[in-house]
């Protein structure tokens, strides 16, 4: 009995000489005057519909830093739906639109306001109104507590703001599982898994990755491949539809991509 007790005690005690597993409190820092160019490419397709693409570039500036908060501006520079797309000439008039707001050390925006470009055509006024509710360049909020490599944290669908007007976020459940893959004082690598049911006819799933530059308070790269599973009923016949979506974001410090 004594031998068995000592064996169990040895199994539960920490091994001598082993270093404790380090914990990482992920937080952003900001530098006033810093700027980055952000490139975003997204595509959407189904088996029956040709691929639709959109790409844009934004200039991100840190206008001011107060304590652990920063005043950020994200200015739209280019927006394209692909070569020779007739929409390009219209949406080019949105160039110069800028979002401004305060962001905290966990990457959470308190509020964003949209400053539209000068002399915006009336045709684009409804779109400007929708864009005013969009959170461009919003990073995934960092966890509240310190993590070890391999630990997860959850972000609910309601906090993802998955559509400009928030309608998806209000209806969806589930959300995003983030797993810390590695971390240093400068950079954090995170794996992403999305599972967000909306109702019995719609569900979005996906996987991706995220690299954060903690010292500049920015997203270095973001990738997400997701599928929106839908069921449509036409003339009493219900058919499944899968809308495949890809999203890529990369950013570089300074004035050049």
Image: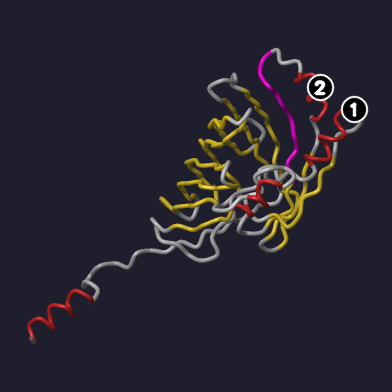
Q: Which residue is mark 2?
A: 90
Labelled pair 1, 2 in contact (Cβ < 8 Å): yes
Q: Is residue 192 above or below residue 41?
A: below
* Residue at x-position 79% and y-position 25%: 91
Q: Is residue 157 above or below residue 4?
A: above
* Figure colour scheme: secondary structure
Q: Is residue 79 part of the magenta span, yes or no?
A: yes
Q: Quadrant of the N terminus?
A: bottom left
13 left or right of 175 in image: left
Where disc 2 sits, the SS reads: helix
Q: Main secondary structure of the magenta part?
A: strand
In the rendered image, residue 77, in percent from the top left (x then y), is placed at: 74, 30
Range of the magenta residues?
73-83
> Which numbered marker is on residue 205?
none
Q: Residues within 10 Å of mark 2 (few under 14, many from 20)?
A: few
Q: CA distance from mark 1 to mark 2?
A: 9 Å
Label 1 vs 2, first from the N-terminus: 2
Where disc 1 sits, the SS reads: loop
> Which numbered marker is on residue 121?
1
Closer-to-camera residue (136/237): 237
Q: Is residue 27 part of the magenta span, yes or no?
A: no
* Residue at x-position 69% and y-position 64%: 67
Q: Residues within 10 Å of mark 1 (few under 14, many from 20)?
A: few
Closer-to-camera residue (184/144): 144
């Amino acid at each position: 009995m004594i031998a068995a007790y000592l064996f169990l005690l040895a199994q539960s005690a920490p091994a001598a000489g082993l270093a404790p597993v380090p914990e990482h409190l992920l937080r952003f820092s900001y530098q006033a005057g810093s700027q980055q160019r952000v490139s975003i490419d997204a595509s959407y397709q189904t088996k029956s519909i040709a691929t639709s693409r959109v790409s844009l570039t934004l200039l991100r500036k840190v206008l001011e830093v107060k304590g652990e908060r920063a005043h950020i501006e994200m200015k739209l520079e280019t927006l394209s739906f692909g070569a020779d797309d007739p929409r390009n000439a219209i949406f080019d008039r949105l160039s110069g639109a800028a979002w401004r707001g305060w962001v905290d050390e966990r990457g959470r925006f308190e509020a964003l306001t949209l400053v539209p470009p000068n002399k915006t055509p009336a045709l684009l006024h409804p779109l400007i109104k929708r864009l005013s509710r969009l959170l461009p360049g919003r990073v995934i909020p960092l966890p509240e507590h310190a993590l070890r490599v391999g630990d997860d944290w959850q972000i609910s669908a309601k906090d993802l703001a998955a559509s400009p007007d928030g309608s998806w976020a209000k209806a969806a459940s589930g959300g995003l599982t983030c797993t810390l893959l590695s971390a240093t004082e400068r950079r954090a690598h995170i794996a992403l898994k999305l599972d967000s049911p909306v109702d019995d006819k719609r569900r979005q799933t996906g996987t991706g990755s995220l690299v954060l530059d903690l010292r500049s308070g920015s997203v270095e790269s973001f990738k997400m491949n997701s599928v929106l599973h839908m069921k449509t009923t036409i003339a009493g016949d219900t058919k499944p539809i899968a809308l495949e979506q890809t999203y890529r974001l990369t950013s570089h410090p300074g004035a050049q991509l």
